Amino acid sequence: MNEILLLIFGMGLVTYLPRATPLIVLSGIKMPPFIKRVLNNIPFAALGALIFPGILSSTGDYFLGVAGGAAALILAYMELNLVIVVSGSIAVIYLLKVFIS
């Protein structure tokens, strides 16, 4: 039991340190506006890089994946709730699969 708790604590520490270190070290440094804009856009770029391959390979059919991704993009652009965006994307893929097959 102690080994498991020590393992959990160690994993938490290893995850926390890389996140907290820049916050502590860079807290007093003024960054140029360009660097701030670049750093603010990194999460969106990383999210896109993680999601796009999944869209193409999720259904085994590129057309269905792209159609579901497009539906999700349109619904998200309309600023709808995340549950509605995901449900709408799933519904589009399901309906296309039913009518195409």
Image (cartoon, grey):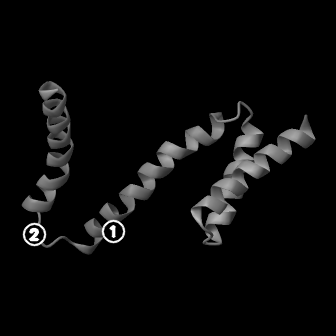
Q: Is residue 68 above or below residue 9?
A: below
Residue 63: percent from the left, percent from the top? Answer: 77, 41
The residue beneath circle 1 is: 37
Q: Residue at x 34, y 65 (%)?
A: 40
Amino acid type, residue under disc 2 in the picture: Ile
- State the residue in front, 26 or 89: 89
In the image: residue 90, left or right of residue 19:
right
Residue 64: percent from the left, percent from the top? Answer: 76, 41
- State the residue in front, 29 or 61: 61
Q: Is residue 50 above or below residue 24?
A: above
The residue beneath circle 2 is: 29
Q: Does the image show residue 70?
A: no
In the image: residue 41, left or right of residue 20:
right
Q: Is residue 46 above or below residue 35?
A: above
Which element is circle 1 on?
A: helix
Q: Which quadrant of the rendered structure holds the N terminus? A: top left
Mark 1 or mark 2: which comes first in sequence?
A: 2
Amino acid type, residue under disc 1 in the picture: Arg
